[in-house]
Amino acid sequence: AAPDQADTRQRQLLEEMAYFRDLAARETERREAAEQELQATRSQTASLLGEFDDALKEEARVLQREADDAMQRRVEAWGDELAQAGAYWKHENQAQVEATRCEAQEQLNEKQELIMHLEEQVARHKHEEEDWAREAAAAQVHMGEAHEVIVSSQAAAAILRAESAEQAAQLRA
């Protein structure tokens, strides 16, 4: 009966070891999948941030160039008109210049608000990437805890095997 008990206990220990090995393998797969997902997310976020940054810079250059060109063309046109039309038209055109300047300033302000909005989006994406990094660090801590459980289970299994072997030796004797 004692050898049967030892065999049964040994089978139980082997089953427990298999369970913990399977648990460790699943946790490793999960961690690797999480790391791959994090890498993909980081890559995608970096790509998006680069695209946002490039688009923002290009939009700012285009808007500035358009504003400069439009203002230059308007100023040149008004200057010619003012020189030809005399004092009355000079007064009239000055009002138009001011209105157009105000309009151009409003457009510029709107474009600057758009730029600030895009910069806020870029900052928000950076914060999300930091959150993902913290989650990955937490997953690594959980992996460490699972590893400690496996190591302590293996140690317990080794102790039980030794005790079973000792009991079997005593029973034989």
Image (cartoon, rainbow, N blue to C red):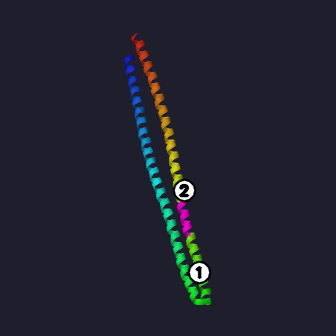
- Magenta stretch contains residue 116: yes
Q: Going from the N terminus, do you reach mark 1 or mark 2 first? A: 1
The residue singled out by tag 1 in the image is 97
**Which quadrant would residue 18 be assigned to in this image?**
top left
Prevalent SS, magenta region = helix
Left or right of 172 on screen, residue 66: right
Percent of width and height locating residue 82? 58, 86
The correct choice, above or below, for 27 with respect to 160 in the image is: below
For label 1, count other residues whose C-alpha is less than 10 Å away and answer few (under 14), some (14-19) or many (20+): some
The residue singled out by tag 2 in the image is 123
Q: Given the image, on which type of amino acid does mark 2 rest?
A: Ala
Residue 84 bears which disc, if any?
none
* SS under mark 1: helix
Percent of width and height locating residue 172? 39, 11
Q: Given the image, on which type of amino acid does mark 1 rest?
A: Val
* SS under mark 2: helix
Query: Which stretch is magenta?
Result: 110-119
Residue at 49 percent of width and 66 percent of height: 59
Residue at 39 percent of width and 17 percent of height: 2
Q: Is residue 43 at all visible to an observer of this figure?
A: yes
Residue at 55 percent of width and 72 percent of height: 107
Left or right of 97 on screen, residue 49: left
In space, the residues marked 1 and 2 are separated at their CA atoms by: 38 Å
**Which quadrant would residue 162 be assigned to in this image?**
top left
Percent of width and height locating residue 58? 49, 64
Q: Nearer the viewer, residue 76 or 4?
A: 76
The quadrant in which the C terminus is found is top left
Q: Nearer the viewer, residue 129 or 72?
A: 72
For label 2, count other residues whose C-alpha is less than 10 Å away and answer few (under 14), some (14-19) or many (20+): few
